[in-house]
Image (cartoon, helix red, strand yellow):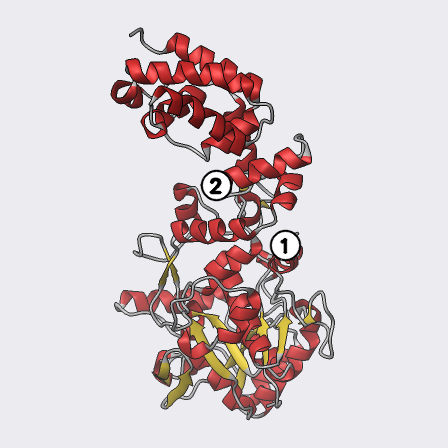
Amino acid sequence: MPNSVRVRFAPSPTGPLHIGGVRTALYNFLLARKLGGTFILRIEDTDQARFVPGAEAYILESLAWLGISPDEGIGAGGPFEPYRQSERKEMYKAYADELIQSGKAYYAFDTSEELDAMRTTFENQGSAFQYNAVTRVKLRNSLSLSKEEVDQLLANNTPYVIRLKVPAKGEIRFQDIIRDWVHVHTSSIDDKVLMKSDGMPTYHLANVVDDHIMQITHVIRGEEWLPSAPLHILLYQAFGWDAPQFAHLPLLLKPEGNGKLSKRDADLGGFPVFPLEWKDPQTGAISKGFKQEGYLPEATLNFLAFLGWNPGTEQELFSLDELIAAFSLERINKAGAKFDVKKAQWFNEQYLKQHDAKELAATYLTSIEAEKGEAYVHLFLDRITFPQQLGQMVQEFSEFPASYDEAVLTSKWNAETKQALELILGALPTCTHWHAEEIKQCISQCLEVAGIKMGKVMQLFRVAMSGKGAGPDLMISLELWGKDQVLARLNKALEKFPNI
């Protein structure tokens, strides 16, 4: 094993990258940065039947958006090129042949019909078929056939697969960083196919060979791969190689916590489970993406980091550098992590507040003069979750109220407050500099002369301006509406409010 940490993210290009895969990439990235190691991106495309055009580019774009691009591998190059498994096909065959020569693997010539027949026989007996130490002697392979028969079949180019020869009796044990010791008896593992009849390796062989060649020190992957880990340990042992350290991450659960998170859950809940928007190349169906929904990359990273990990402190907001400094595999939980959409939104709100107002205005309020756009951002920033809501807020803010809060009118509208609004209507035209502070002073002075406290009338005044009993800072709102519109709104309200 190398002295420095080497980790890899190895997705398959079978569609858009699920947010759970992004979390796996993030944890690999954080460990590499924390320990001064290397983060590698490898594309595992041995299953050519499930290959989806555009999926690989989508993976690269997603990692780039989040700022966790690889140091080595696809998109970065490196000493172990190529990093796409379909381009390493011949190499895997050599390793499979090595296992055959050492007696750790064998040729299997069974046809699909023969295997189906064997499967049916077992089902009729009330059990499940497994290609293993018990059944392989009854099937057509290089363990049950003579050497002459095997040589003849190979000479005739008879289709075959290469299977791992799993020991009949034995225990596999390894220590997972997150789950501690794992024990599995070999009788529960079947003789997995290592090389398919089309000459392509299966995931298991390619994964182990590549991890060894690329000197991977830590395999950090989802819990769904835990059942494959004993098989991979067997492969490392068969080759006589040291296995990397394993860390199997907890599942991402539905927001309610009952079951694994799926795209269907996201569609029903109206939230994304992909980092970027994805258009299915076959159906044209579009799936939501975190980016297009308005989530900021730094908020998305912070949210994902906490899905299964915690720093052991009360701190919740972390920059990427702070995440790197705080991260450790030992603080990842075994239990599944609820995909709390409300928490994701909260993170986004916190990071939005830290964003530069001028930049937000230039991006999302392009039709508004820069200085005024920036003022709108300051006015609404505490009231939005996503930046694109700014445009909607400004539009609603600019429209005259179509109705007025009945509850406020019922409780606040009386002869005194009517007098107060009429006094304000008369005083506002005298404001020479239309700024929030002067507007407030002007209103305060006219009410003070009449002996009316501002607190008695301000909510009603807000209703007259916006139709609503609550909203953003009223004085700044008055400044942004402008004197003419404020007077027009107040005149309209006094006409619409009930006669007293």
User: Would you call the spot at circle 1 few (<14 residues within 10 Å), some (14-19), or many (20 or more)?
Assistant: some
Helix, strand or loop at disc 1?
helix
Up/down of 391 relative to 87, above or below: above
Q: Which mark is residue 383?
A: none
Q: Which mark is residue 384?
A: 2
Quadrant of the frame with the N terminus: bottom right
Q: Quadrant of residue 5?
A: bottom right
Where is residue 329? Give x, y as percent. 45, 77
Labelled pair 2, 1 in contact (Cβ < 8 Å): no
- The three-letter code of the residue at mark 1 reads Tyr
**Image check: 216 left or right of 136?**
right
- The three-letter code of the residue at mark 2 reads Ile
Front residue of 177 and 57: 177
How many marks overall? 2
Of labels 2 and 1, the one closer to you? 2
Q: Quadrant of residue 76?
A: bottom right
Where is residue 32? Give x, y as percent. 58, 77
Where is residue 85? Give x, y as percent. 65, 70
User: Would you call the spot at circle 2 few (<14 residues within 10 Å), some (14-19), or many (20 or more)?
Assistant: some
Where is residue 23? Give x, y as percent. 50, 63
Up/down of 277 relative to 6, above or below: above
Front residue of 47 and 212: 212
**Image check: 214 left or right of 178?**
right
Q: Which mark is residue 58?
A: 1
Front residue of 313 and 279: 313
Front residue of 226 and 433: 433
Residue at 29% x, 7% y: name it. 500
Helix, strand or loop at disc 2?
loop
